Each structure stands twice: as C-alpha cells, then as structure tokens.
Amino acid sequence: MTKGKRKSGASRTSASRSRIKSKVAGRNRKGLRRSVRGRRLRARRQRTAVSAVAYNQAYDAGFDEAYNEGFDQGYAQGLETGHQEAYQAEV
C-alpha cells in the first residue's frame, strides 16, 4: 500500500481500510476505475450478466409448467384407475 503524503509512522486511514475490505478494492488499486481496460471489462460484465430477476422469472415459469404437466398426468391416471367406475357412471 502506498502511503501518499502521510508521515512514515502513521497507521492506515479509515478510508484506506475500507478500500482494502471492499470487493472492489483490487480493481480500484489496479486503476481499473479510470483506465480504458477497466471500462471494457465493466462493459463486458454488463453484456454477459443475466439479471437475477430474469433468471428467477424463467425458473418460475419452467417450474410452473412442469408442475402443471405433472398434475395433469396424475389426474388423467387417477381417472383411468381409481375413478374409473365413477367416471364411467358420469359418462
């Protein structure tokens, strides 16, 4: 860590500490905030990212579809076997 203009014995500033803790710390330290390379990386991250909302919607839709299909199958089977007599009486 470069100390900048602080005196040789000085401890880390709180700002410096928080930078180290954060996930972004490494990126900031490598100058990716200001550099062209950083901008390209950020742009790529945005392009390839699937938003959590979109993912969850797709997942839910798939789940609902599968669930309903299973329910329909079960119902049809029930009619064929257990409810056959009652079903025939209805027809």
Image: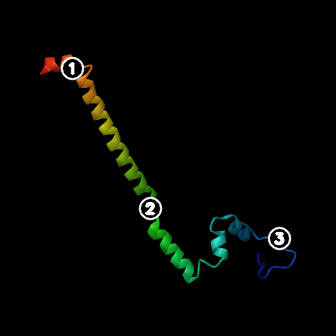
Image x and y of residue 6, in percent: 80, 79
Q: Earlier in the sequence, mark 3 or mark 2?
A: 3
Q: Identify the residue under disc 2.
A: 50
- The residue under label 3 is which amino acid type? Ser
Instruction: Tell me the colour scheme of the image.
Output: rainbow
Picture layout, residue 45 above or below residue 60: below
Which part of the image, by quadrant, shows the C terminus? top left
Image x and y of residue 33, in percent: 59, 77
Residue, far left: 91
Picture layout, residue 69 above or below residue 24: above
Q: Which mark is residue 62?
A: none
Residue positioned 32% across, 43% down in the render: 65
The answer to which of 18 and 29 lies nearer the viewer is 29
**Quadrant of res 52:** bottom left
Which part of the image, by quadrant, shows the N terminus? bottom right
Picture layout, residue 3 above or below residue 78: below
Between marks 3 and 2, how big is the CA–CA gap?
42 Å
Q: Which mark is residue 11?
A: 3
The nearer-to-camera label among 3 and 2 is 2
Residue positioned 37% across, 52% down in the render: 58
Q: Identify the residue under disc 1.
A: 84
The nearer-to-camera label among 3 and 1 is 1
Q: Earlier in the sequence, mark 3 or mark 1?
A: 3
The answer to which of 55 and 1 lies nearer the viewer is 55
Label 3 crowd bin: few (<14), some (14–19), many (20+), radius 10 Å: few
- The residue under label 1 is which amino acid type? Gln
Between marks 2 and 1, how big is the CA–CA gap?
48 Å
